[in-house]
Amino acid sequence: MNVDTIPETYTHYHVSTLTGQRSCVTDLQQILAQYYNLKNDEVKVTPMFSSYKEGMNYVPLEIRLGKDCYKFSNVDDAKKMFKKHFKKVFIEQKSEKFSRNLEYGKWRLKCKDEIDSDWIRGGISIKHVKKLFAASEGQTLTKCHWKFGSNEFVDRKCRHCGQAVETVYHILNRCEKFKKSLFVSRHNNIYVKGRKIYKNNNAEIFFDTPYPLLSQVVASNPDMVIIDKQRRKSYVFDFAVSFFPNMKQMESIKKVKYTWNGTVEVNNSNYQDIHKQPKSTNYASALEEETGYECMFIPVVFSSFGDCFRGTKDLLNKEFKIGKLASNRMWAHASKEVVLGSVRIIEHHLA
C-alpha cells in the first residue's frame, strides 16, 4: 500500500451510520497500533460525537498512543499529522531493512583495524565514487538487482559471458570477457614499472619477469622480485585484486603457492589441503637456495573497491624504511588505480 494514501484510506470516511463510524475508528486504531508498534489496547481513538448522524469529517478526535494523547479539531488535522508520522516510520523501516543488507559496510566495520582505503586521498572524481559505492553495496543495476523483480523465469545470466549469474561479484572478478583485458589492466596498474629488469651493483629488480631458477616450480611468475645484494636479502611480491570477503583467502592462497608447495596448481578449492601436506619445493625456497639470500614473500592483496591490509603496508614501510609522506602517496596511487579499474569494468559491462 502506498504510504501517502494510508491516512486517506483509514480516516477519510463520509459515513453517517453508527456501524460505518465504528468501522472507521477500528481501522484507524489498528493502523496506528501497527505503525507505532503498540498493542491494540494501547491505542484508542475517541470521536467527540454530538450526534451519530454527524459526518466524521467534522467531528473532533482524541487519539491516545500509549501514554501520549493528541486532540484534533477535525479529521483533516489528524490526517496531516499522521501522514507526516507514517512517512517517518515508513522511511525508518526501509532504512533499517536496507542497512541490514549492506554487506560491505558491515565488513568494513568488522575489519576497521585491519583495512585501509587509501584511494580516498587519491583525488577520484565524485562520479567514480558514486559508481564505486553503488557497486560496493550491491546497488548496481545488474540482472540480479531487486528492481528487476524475483520472477524465476527472468534470465539472470551475465549479458557478456552467459556463464554465471550476473552479480557485482561476477562483474568485478569472474567475467570471462574481461579476464584477459580489463582485469589484467587493473592488476598491472597497481605498481608503476618502466623496464622489465633493473640491475646495478647493489640490487636487481624484475617486473613481470621470472628470476631465472634452476628448480622447476609451477608457481614461477611473481609480479616483482627484488634481490638486495647489500642486505643479502631477496623479496618476492605477488599482487592480487579480490572481492572484499575473499581477501584473506586470497592472501593464504598466495602464501601456499609461493612458500609452501610450488609443484602443483594451487587454487581456492585445494589450498587448505595442500597446506596440510609436507612442505615441498616452492619459489621462495628455490630462490633462497640459488641466491644464498634470505627470501621474504609479501602478498599484496586489494579488494575490488581499493581496500588493502594495514599489516601489509606496515610491513613494507618498515622493511624498506619508507617515510610517511612517500608511503601515503604510494598506497593512495595503488588503491586509486584499483578503484578506477573496477569502475572501468562496471562502465564497460553495463554500457
Image (cartoon, rainbow, N blue to C red):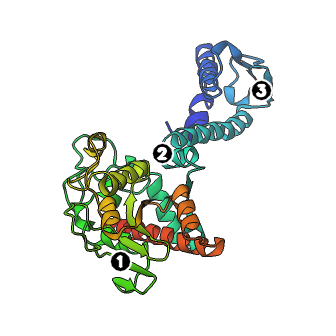
Choose the circle earlier in sequence order: 1 or 2: 2
Q: Nearer the viewer, residue 93 or 4?
A: 93
Q: Nearer the viewer, residue 168 or 117?
A: 117
* Amino acid identity at mark 1: Phe
The residue at 50%/70% (across/down) is 336
Q: Are marks 2 and 3 in contact (CB under 8 Å)?
A: no
Find disc 1 in the rendering and name its residue. Answer: 206
Q: x and y percent of residue 142 in the render?
A: 34, 55
Secondary structure at badge 1 equals strand
Choose the circle earlier in sequence order: 3 or 1: 3
* Amino acid identity at mark 3: Pro
The residue at 35%/64% (across/down) is 288
Q: Is residue 59 above or below residue 18?
A: below
* Amino acid identity at mark 2: Glu
Give the left or right position of residue 25, taking residue 150 as reference: right
Structural crowding at the residue carrying mark 3, measured as other residues with C-alpha within 10 Å and reported as few (<14), some (14–19) or many (≥20): some
Structural crowding at the residue carrying mark 2, measured as other residues with C-alpha within 10 Å and reported as few (<14), some (14–19) or many (≥20): some
* Eye-nearest disc, 3 or 1: 1
The residue at 59%/29% (across/down) is 10
Give the left or right position of residue 81, taking residue 347 as reference: right
Measured Cα–Cα span from mark 3 to mark 1: 85 Å
Find disc 3 in the rendering and name its residue. Answer: 60
Q: x and y percent of residue 202 in the render?
A: 46, 82
Structural crowding at the residue carrying mark 1, measured as other residues with C-alpha within 10 Å and reported as few (<14), some (14–19) or many (≥20): many
Image quadrant assignment for residue 294: bottom left
Secondary structure at badge 3 equals loop
Give the left or right position of residue 147, taking residue 221 as reference: right
Find disc 2 in the rendering and name its residue. Answer: 103
Choose the circle earlier in sequence order: 2 or 3: 3
